[in-house]
Image (spheres, coloured by chain):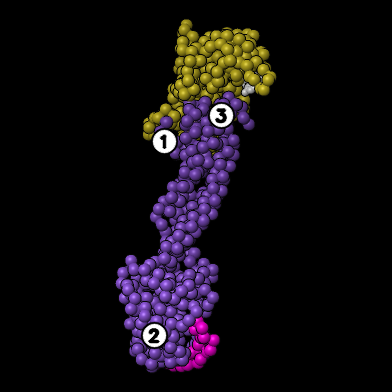
Amino acid sequence: MRAKDMIILAYKALWTHKLRTSLLILSVIIGVAAIVALTAQTEGIGKSIVSSLQKLGPDTLIFNVFNRRLTDTDVALIRSLDGVRDVIPIIRSEASVNIGGNIVSATIYGINIEDLEKLLGDIKVINGEIYQDSSAPMALVGYQLAYSNSSDTPMIIPGQMILVATRGGFFSTSSATASLIVSGVLDSYGSMFLISPDTSIFISLQAASKMLRRTWYDMLIIKVSDPSYLDMVSETLRNIYGSTASVTSPTQIIQTTQNIVIQLSILLGGIAAISLATASLGVLNMMIVTVTERTREIGTLKALGFKDRHILMQILFEGFIIGLVGGVLGVIIGVAVSYMLPNILGGSLLRGFRAPMYTAGRGFGGGVAFSYTPYINPVMMLVAFALAPTVSVISSLYPAWRASKMDPVRALRYE
Amino acid sequence: MSDEPLIRLLDVWKIYRIGKLESPALRGVSLDIYKGEFLSIIGPSGSGKTTLLNLLGALDRPTKGEILFEKISLNKLSPDQLAEFRNKKIGFVFQSFNLLNHLTVVENVEIPMMVLGVPPKIRREKALKILGELLPEEVFYKRPIEISSGEQQRVAIARALANDPDVILADEPTGNLDSSNAHVVMRIFRKLRDEGKTIVMVTHNQELTSYADRVVRLRDGQIVEVIKR
Ligand SMILES: Nc1ncnc2c1ncn2[C@@H]1O[C@H](COP(=O)(O)OP(=O)(O)OP(=O)(O)O)[C@@H](O)[C@H]1O
Ligand SMILES: [Mg+2]
């Protein structure tokens, strides 16, 4: 008997029970789609974190001390260390900003313009111009702050004066009110590690120092001459500053992030696989029912010359078709759902979830949702797709075997 | 009818075991069936008629004794060989037709040829040819449930004839038919007999035995009478 004929017979047998078959295919679709969609989220989030970390470069260390203040003396000292190429001092303060009558939270960064360029990779000004490294209170405003309501009409335009009330830095409890003049508006940068340009206001170091009336820095970003010096420089810094020194390298975080993402993928993939397992129990259950219902038909087919293996193959093909159709549609729907999920999750669940460090304890009130693009791993997609028919055929094995072993005499007597 | 028996049953026993209980359905049946004869088997319910037919059709094996088909013992054949034997040499006709309702009439007739591996075009042609002699054309592409029971049984006969078998085995083929359809089926069998087919038919209907060449009466799993007509 030709395989093609058996497939046609299997297909026609399935088609007689349209509703039953469709529901079964649906359960397979859900399983496959869940695997594809959920793993796409974790991989997408992971990749997004990693790429935002990578923007800082593999030669970067983020340095902070919690029991004293970092001043120009520290900057000079660290600059003189072996393996250190550059030190970027940053002043940072949370602030409330009055934008068109609305009080909005933002982060103020005091950073020299060429350092800002190193940090952002590229200063993309969509309106106005950059500030100069002077004590003039000129500011570059993040995209989200300027276009908080609509993407057409900016709330802030260059030359405009904005009122900010700072809430102090790491150690400061004092607050100050100052007015800044907008020099330009930045383009959207999306989510980045360490800094969220979209909800930040950048001013020069001097201006920040003057506005906050302090000469110490909140963090230093250290660039080493070569990534291989990262460990050495970290070690030196810890020796100098003791246990309260916090030295973080994005490379380390990338490692940790990737590990977390892998574990999360396994967890979510596992949960999704459970739904596929449930679907396979559905296939098993329905096949047992179908085979019992079709006892007479099986007896007839045997009388007409079907061998045991013909019956076996016929039932297996039925399972295969369910798995194959479920797999194909499951992957398609899984991909579609993958791209829909960030809008659902990103809008609520992951709000404020950003780079893992430096955000703890101090909420970004900016309300920028964490944005990421789901990543459809082709291997994962293939695995999910191949899993469906495999699992479905395996579930059909026992019912198929039972059908093939049916005694035709009894089968024909069956009412 | 030739002198050489096509099928020989030699002291055939069939004992069903249900748990510890042994119930003998056939107790030492010996019978020669000749090529081209129309044999009818009658007997009360439970006398072993269906059991005998199933053994002739190699759907089951005797507990004791031997069945020879063209001098070859069916006991010696493997399950796969028995399936091939049923496919090529035997055509079954059942009381309740046993057509596949998810296939069309013509597809039902094609099934035995499908098993044999006949290419689609050739088997469709042959199925249509066989159907053409038994049924009006408008039923060929209908589903079995859409046609009358008389027509359904003729489809089943067409299916039994698909691989041009030597023997037609019919278990109460008229049991679900009205009298006029029953006579239609009988005339078809009679015609097939004239064309050289061997027909073995189980029936309850004494009147229909008049179409047969010989009538075998069973009681309690034994042949009690053979009537030649
Ligand atoms: N698969 C089976 N298992 C157990 N006993 C069976 C089986 N098939 C038949 N029998 C028994 O064997 C005996 C003969 O049955 P069989 O079906 O051959 O009778 P029959 O002459 O065809 O009867 P009917 O006219 O009712 O169809 C009966 O007692 C029946 O109960
Ligand atoms: Mg019977």
At mark 2, the secondary structure is helix
Q: CA distance from mark 1 to mark 3?
A: 21 Å
- State which quarter of the image contains the C terminus of chain A: top right
Where residue A406 is drawn, which disc sits there?
A: 3
Residue that carries the numbered disc 2 in the rendered image:
A72
Is A67 within the magenta? no
Residue that carries the numbered disc 1 in the rendered image:
A3
User: Can you see residue A289?
Assistant: yes
At mark 1, the secondary structure is helix
Q: Nearer the viewer, residue B99 or B47?
A: B47
Q: For the residue marked with disc 1, what is the amino acid?
A: Ala
Crowding near the residue tagged with mark 3, few <14, some 14–19, many ≥20 C-alpha atoms within 10 Å: some
Residue at point 46% right, 91% down?
A213
Labels 1 and 2: the sequence-earlier one: 1
Labels 1 and 3: the sequence-earlier one: 1
Q: Position of residue A120 (x, y in %)?
A: 36, 77
Q: Is residue A325 above or below residue A247?
A: above
User: Can you see residue A193?
Assistant: no
Q: Position of residue A150 (x, y in %)?
A: 46, 81
Q: Nearer the viewer, residue B149 or A189?
A: A189
> Nearer the viewer's eye, disc 1 or disc 2?
2
Q: Which chain is purple?
A: A
| Subunit bearing disc 3 | A
